[in-house]
Amino acid sequence: MEQIIALKEIFIRAIPSFVLVWILFAFIARLFYRPLRAAMDQRRQETEGAREAAASRIALMEEKTGEYEEALRASRAELYREQEQELGKAMERREAILKQARAKAEEKILQSRQEIVRETGEAKKVLAQESKQMAQWIAQAILDPTKSMPRRAAPGAAS
């Protein structure tokens, strides 16, 4: 029983400390934890707001990037189409130039062939005339050796 009385006295002496701890807890909670919790809640809300704003900006930028890439693809396709058209026109011009060059070359070849045929005909006429003249000289030299063409000196003979 003595122990119960001692325990009772300990509890009675502990009541003011217990009450003082509860008052200190309420005081600290009111003066320190509430403003701290309010500041943390405000910071969390601002952070979440900033995250949401950043997410919406990112989505907007991704959308704009997609539009830009689509416009870029369209521009490239247009550029390639124009390049193909220009290449086609250049190829047509090249073909026309080649056709003209071939026509000129064929014309020159034809003219050259005609010139060769004309020159060949003239050469044949000249040869025919010269051969007639040579035949007359030969015949005259054989028939009348005194009237023949002047003779050349024999090699090694003194003149």
Image: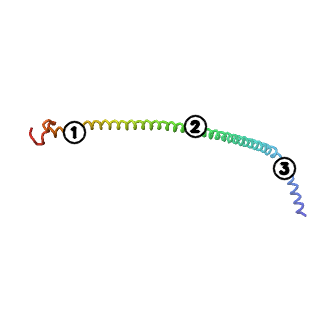
Residue 22 shows which numbered tag?
3
Q: Position of residue 94 (x, y in %)?
A: 49, 37
The type of residue carrying mark 2 is Glu
- Name the residue that disc number 1 marks: 135
Q: Could you tell me how many numbered marks the image carries?
A: 3
Give the residue at the far bottom of this rendering: 1
Residue at 32% in and 37% down: 121
Element under label 2?
helix
CA separation in Å, label 1 and label 3: 158 Å
- Horizontal placement of 148 versus 115: left or right? left
CA neighbours of label 3 inside 10 A, class few (<14), some (14 to 19), many (20+): few
Which sits earlier in the primary sequence, circle 1 or circle 2? 2
Element under label 1?
helix
Residue at 22% in and 39% down: 135
- Name the residue that disc number 2 marks: 82
Q: Position of residue 21 (x, y in %)?
A: 83, 50
The type of residue carrying mark 3 is Trp
CA neighbours of label 1 inside 10 A, class few (<14), some (14 to 19), many (20+): few
Which sits earlier in the primary sequence, circle 1 or circle 3? 3
Residue 37's quadrant in the figure?
A: top right
Residue 30's quadrant in the figure?
A: top right
Q: Position of residue 51 (x, y in %)?
A: 72, 43
Residue 49's quadrant in the figure?
A: top right
Position of the C terminus by quadrant: top left
Q: Position of residue 97 (x, y in %)?
A: 47, 36
